[in-house]
Amino acid sequence: RTRASPEQLAILERTFAVNPSPNHRIREQLSHELGMSERSIQIWFQNRRAKVKTAIKRSNMM
């Protein structure tokens, strides 16, 4: 498993704030920019959306 560097994470987080579900073209662009595989970027966004969903569920329980 490869971990994203802090610089890569910052760019991914910034992109997520604007668009939580990027299309193929945006993922491809990020892939070239960050030097990560498109699949790992896709999975990162999937996991990030799940994290947000979990946080919302938790806050609604309180």
Image (cartoon, rainbow, N blue to C red):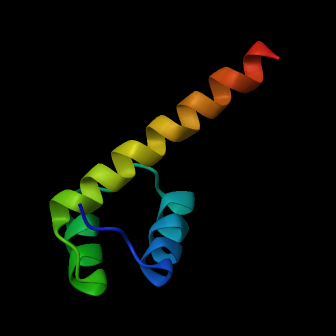
Q: Is residue 50 above or below residue 41?
A: above
Residue 27 lies in quadrant: bottom left
Total tally of numbered discs in the picture:
0
Measured as percent of width and height from the top left, residue 43 is found at 28, 50
Residue 26 in the figure: left or right of residue 19 = left
x 75%, y 18%: residue: 60
Q: Is residue 43 above or below residue 52?
A: below
x 57%, y 39%: residue: 52
Residue 35 lies in quadrant: bottom left
Quadrant housing the N terminus: bottom left
Residue 37 in the figure: left or right of residue 5 = left
Residue 37 lies in quadrant: bottom left
Q: Is residue 55 above or below residue 16?
A: above
x 57%, y 29%: residue: 54
Measured as percent of width and height from the top left, residue 59 is found at 75, 25
Q: Nearer the viewer, residue 17 or 10?
A: 10
Measured as percent of width and height from the top left, residue 2 is found at 26, 67
x 30%, y 82%: residue: 34
